[in-house]
Image: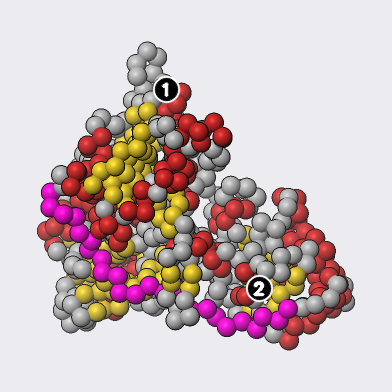
Amino acid sequence: MATGKEFWVFSEKQNLLSELAAGVRSLVDPDEGLVAAVVWGTRQESEQAAGKANRVYWLGERPQDALVEDCVPTLARLVQEQNPYGLVVGSTRRGKAVAGRLAARLGVTVVTDVLEFQPDGDGLTARHMIWGGGAVRLEKIASPPVIATVGPGVFDAQIVQSVSPGEIIEVPFVEPEWRLTLRERKTRPPAAVNLASARKVVCSGRGVANMQDLSMIEELARLMGAEIACTRPLAEGLDWLPRERYIGVSGAFVKPDIYMGIGVSGQVQHTVGMSGSRVVVAINKDANAPIFAQADYGIVGDLYSVVPALINAIKARRGT
Amino acid sequence: MNVVVCCKLTPDPGDLEVRSDGTISLDRAEWSIGNFDLQAIEAGVRLAQPAAGKVTALSAGPRPIQNSKLKKDILSRGPDELVLVVDESLRMADTAMTARVLAQAVRKLGPVDLVLCGEGSADLYFQQVGLQLGEMLHLPTLNAVSKIELIQDAGSSPNTLRIERSLEDELEILEVPLPAVLSVTTDINQPRLPTMMEILKASKKTVTEWALSDLELDGSPQGQIEVLDVRAPVQVQRKKVMIPGTPEEAAQALVGYLNKEGIL
């Protein structure tokens, strides 16, 4: 077992916090270790967390205009006082900011977007993707406190509501050295799609010449009952589709029954996000496109003739 | 307005080769500026130029970063000068070590209004160095910055930025007092392609090279991560059936296959 003592979790997202609390459970000694959640939020949130962890460090209520990141000095002091073995932070953009700033204060480093932890002798190893998904690195983190970030869906541990809620310890808030003036906060429209759980995915790539052409691909997706996805340039840069729809190393990871790539060349940064698909179909006019090496079924051809033909073939089979 | 833009120079991830045993090789890779750092350079140049400010590009890494083509590439994108911290020990630097070296280099450069970093490096993509650097310099620091504008006070020199921060489910508009350290997103701008003129100008710009010892760091920086293994992700074996024929024939055949797979 890597640790005899406390393993902490922190996330501004309640669901992710529960996932992390369940996930680090296997990293602590079942007899002597404990899982503690750090919460800066309402009393109710701290009580919810206490249902998932042995202990909650509650930094009090977070004011409306505060940034979550303002708790870094408090976290740093708490870590110094309590000496947890590690802290896993939910891997959101905010989470990465908290982890990085905290680590700098403590003089340690951070491993982000960890895919898997393994106890290793007196320490802990972590797997992490590097080179845009081209390689996976196994690394050992030298000494505590181990600070890492983990994204949603990585730990597949069952979230267990504990019978006896953990104790809630109130922690005095340390005023940060600087605060920024928050002028406005705009909520983005909620994500229309959870690609990670989609059973069928139709993905457009750079082979699609114009934004209007997506409607043809949308028709195919509707017919198949598939979710629409894309490669990164279509969501960032071209802005043809919302960001939550791009598959790849910094975007969504999918594991559907079928992934159909249309005009997708198959750069590793993208394919790393779809390699878990059961069946992969590729349609591309370039016979040398790398995606064909990762496809179960490939059609070399112009998507502008293959996609309409495919729509017709599906309709014909269904007799509509 | 003095802007320092940090960028990481690495072997080009596109040149990564997978050996038959699954390990990877970058021996034949060309080195390049990190993909996600180009936007930071562009953002720095766009902010500083109208204010007649100066942009210094800063990078730390092992000897290959001294490549003259690389230097020219950076400088042709608009920075006025380039500072390199070169040491072989930086080849395996973790984020904390990189941030520490950069922080010391920024201090040595003298008064700075703004330090910019990209979204993440092309090799490790930990998305950490900007944040750690900001904290080490005791300056306000943020990541995910998707817009930056100077708040122009009549008469006085600008000392505050209004920035937009792009988070997963919300946007924040914040005022950030300078000096500050910001990490920008990849969609903050569309980086320019250097013109012939800028490429010619680049070779006349100043490049300063420092060794680690020039930074007078307190003790030699050491990594805290031991790399045990690096290998390509295991490839799923695929059927690789290439379907021939006209689009109509191929489409029909594909529908047949998918039906057999129980998908349609």
The 10 Å Cα crowd at callout 1, few under 14, some 14 to 19, many 20 or more, is few
Tell me residue B98's x, y (percent). Answer: 28, 52
Instruction: Give the number of callouts.
Output: 2
Q: Which residue is mark 1?
A: B51
A35 is higher (above) or lower (below) than A244: below
In the rendered structure, the answer to whether residue A45 lies left or right of residue A288 reads left
The local secondary structure at tag 2 comes to: helix
B208 is higher (above) or lower (below) than B234: above
Q: Is residue A196 visible?
A: no
Q: Chain of mark 1?
A: B
Rendered-image quadrant of the N terminus of chain A: bottom left
Q: Depth check: give the residue in front, B109 or A149.
A: B109
Q: Depth check: give the residue in front, B80 or A86.
A: B80
In the rendered structure, the answer to whether residue A55 lies left or right of residue B155 reads left
Q: What's the amino acid at mark 2?
A: Phe
The local secondary structure at tag 1 comes to: helix
Q: What's the amino acid at mark 1?
A: Ala
The span picked out in magenta is: B218-242
Q: Which residue is mark 2?
A: A292
In the rendered structure, the answer to whether residue A200 lies left or right of residue B67 reads right
Taking the magenta stretch, the answer to whether it contains residue B10 is no
